[in-house]
Image (cartoon, grey):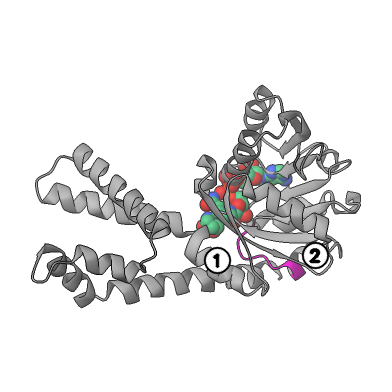
Amino acid sequence: MSVLDNKKISFIGGGNMAQALISGLVSSGVNPELITVSAPSKETRDQYDKQQMNTVDASENPKAAVIGADIVVLAVKPQVMRQVVGEFADALDNQLVISVAAGLSTDLLSDMLGGYSNIVRAMPNTPSMIQMGATGLYGTDAISAEQKQLATAVVEASGLVIWVDDEAHMHAVTAVSGSAPAYMFYFIESMVDGAVALGLDKEKASALAMQTMLGAAKMAMNSDDTPAELRRKVTSPKGTTQAAVESMQANEIGRQISEAMKACSDRSQALSEEMSK
Ligand SMILES: NC(=O)C1=CN([C@@H]2O[C@H](COP(=O)(O)OP(=O)(O)OC[C@H]3O[C@@H](n4cnc5c(N)ncnc54)[C@H](O)[C@@H]3O)[C@@H](O)[C@H]2O)C=CC1
Ligand SMILES: O=C(O)[C@@H]1CCC=N1
């Protein structure tokens, strides 16, 4: 038994994030026939058709995805959100709307939806594609307890879920998890470049760097020690790790990571301001 049993879930947009969440839902046992994807591109619709999902041609009949749905997931870019939802907003009738758009506040989304306020804002990330996602959720006061459970279930199928009480925290969620897979990939890229510069071939360097990141993350998750303590246990006095960590500290890598996250959060805030004009 799941709260999603027999619930009809419609995705507006069938791109990267929709695909990630849908793959989590299907892997967790949701019947693909209960999923609808609205997309303007025939190629995208064909992909979902092949997986036994329903598809709607967004450029011809946008309201068809919304009518009869229990949950509507808005998975289009923030820049096109107003135009896209304007095409079906008047067909909403007590559905739970989940927006995964970066930055857009629930107030702004409600304005775009003509005052509709049954909205949960979600910030997932792309590891959702392999059910290793991390998603932050925030809901308006209009959300019922049952709708809160539905929203949790939609994203929990793809990984970890954390609710925040203060909507402003969604910018921090974007900085620490939504955008953060990109920082991790950047770190891996840089480690591989570093190892190749030291003479190792790229394939071996990649395998070692990725396994190390995975192992360190799993260890941090499963250990009673803090990350700082785990770091200390790798660092032998006057040894090799100390040399590496001191180099990072001299270059203020920690401060630079915080600055990058601040830039991410600032951009998230700016998106709502830009799209409200
Ligand atoms: N990619 C990521 O890592 C994350 C993305 N997001 C958010 O997810 C949203 C979607 O991003 P992506 O999936 O990465 O972009 P994407 O470009 O892969 O997908 C967006 C899709 O919307 C479709 N679309 C455009 N107009 C449409 C319409 N009228 N009706 C239906 N579909 C329409 C496009 O054809 C495209 O396939 C964005 O708002 C983004 O902020 C949130 C968290 C992480
Ligand atoms: O870069 C972006 O704007 C989106 C939102 C979080 C991850 N990708």
Q: Quadrant of the C terminus?
A: bottom right
Regarding residue 185, the answer to whether it shows in the image is yes
User: Secondary structure beneath disc 1?
Assistant: helix
Q: Is residue 98 left or right of residue 204?
A: right
| Image disc number at residue 173 | 1
Is the shortest distance between ligand 1 and the CB of mark 2 under 8 Å?
no
User: Secondary structure beneath disc 2?
Assistant: helix
Image location (x, y in percent) of residue 108: 74, 68
Residue underneath mark 2: 110
| Image disc number at residue 243 | none
Residue 83 versus residue 238: which sits nearer the camera? 238
Seen in the picture, residue 89 relative to 4 is either above or below; the reply is below
Residue 219 versus residue 6: which sits nearer the camera? 219
Image location (x, y in percent) of residue 144: 84, 61
Q: Amino acid at mark 2?
A: Ser
Which residue is depicted at the point 31% across and 71% down?
A: 228
Say whether disc 2 or disc 1 marks the residue closer to the N-terminus. 2
Q: Tell me the chief SS of the magenta region.
A: loop
Q: In this rendering, which labeled residue sits more in front, label 2 or label 1?
A: 1
Task: Say if the magenta span includes residue 188.
Answer: no
* Residue 143 occupies quadrant: bottom right
Seen in the picture, residue 59 relative to 100 is either above or below; the reply is above
Regarding residue 75, the answer to whether it shows in the image is no
